[in-house]
Amino acid sequence: MNRSDPFGLLPDTIEVQSHQVVGDMEHASVRVTPADQARWCNDSRFATGVDGKCFVTFGAGPERCLASALCLKSATNRPGDAIPHTGNIGIDLGGVPENVVIARLFALDGAYADNLHYSLPPIGAGDQNSNSYAAGLLGAAGLAVPALTRNPGWNRPLAPSRFGITW
């Protein structure tokens, strides 16, 4: 059950989740709890949740790089992303099979070079943060990006080219 399906009638296998980080600012990540548990649960990139289902999260955050600068580094199952969240927003897969979308998310995440400058909040041209990463990942995967208002950088998604897309 989530904000886009308040009665819990639809299986939300891919969701945007968000949690508070500073003041009223929130950090977003993408959570995948596949319906096809048999296909994915033996994959070492997945963890097992408190509900016994396997899941993986796609998120990013600041890490030191290039001497004293901070870079936007992506990782699956980052500690703050892997804990259960409430109020998640289900993502419409647009008729694309779930397994195809999951494989696409892994490929796009793998193509991201982890070398962009991190900024919070991202206010200058070219600034980005963890929310920019999550919104950009969804967009590069061809998925609808829901509106979020408490996530600075969400409206500045990383360009698809940062995920290896060269349309």
Image (spheres, helix red, strand yellow):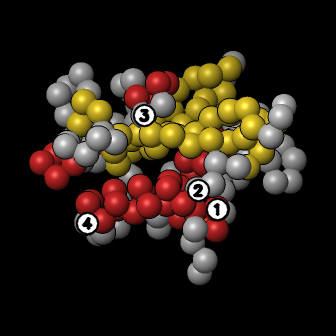
Q: Nearer the viewer, mark 4 or mark 2?
A: 2
2 or 1: tag closer to the N-terminus:
2
Q: Which quarter of the figure is the C terminus placed in?
A: bottom right
Helix, strand or loop at mark 3: loop
Mark 3–mark 4 distance (CA, rounded to whole Å): 23 Å
Residue with the mark numbered 1: 162
Q: In which quarter of the view is residue 21 placed? A: top right
Residue with the mark numbered 2: 112
Q: Is residue 40 above or below residue 167?
A: above
Q: Is residue 47 above or below residue 94?
A: above
- Left or right position of 136 against 95: right
Mark 3–mark 2 distance (CA, rounded to whole Å): 16 Å
Q: Nearer the viewer, mark 3 or mark 4?
A: 3
1 or 4: tag closer to the N-terminus:
4
Helix, strand or loop at mark 2: loop
Query: What type is the residue that disc 3 sits on?
Result: Asn
Please name the residue shown 24% across and 30% down the image. Answer: 48
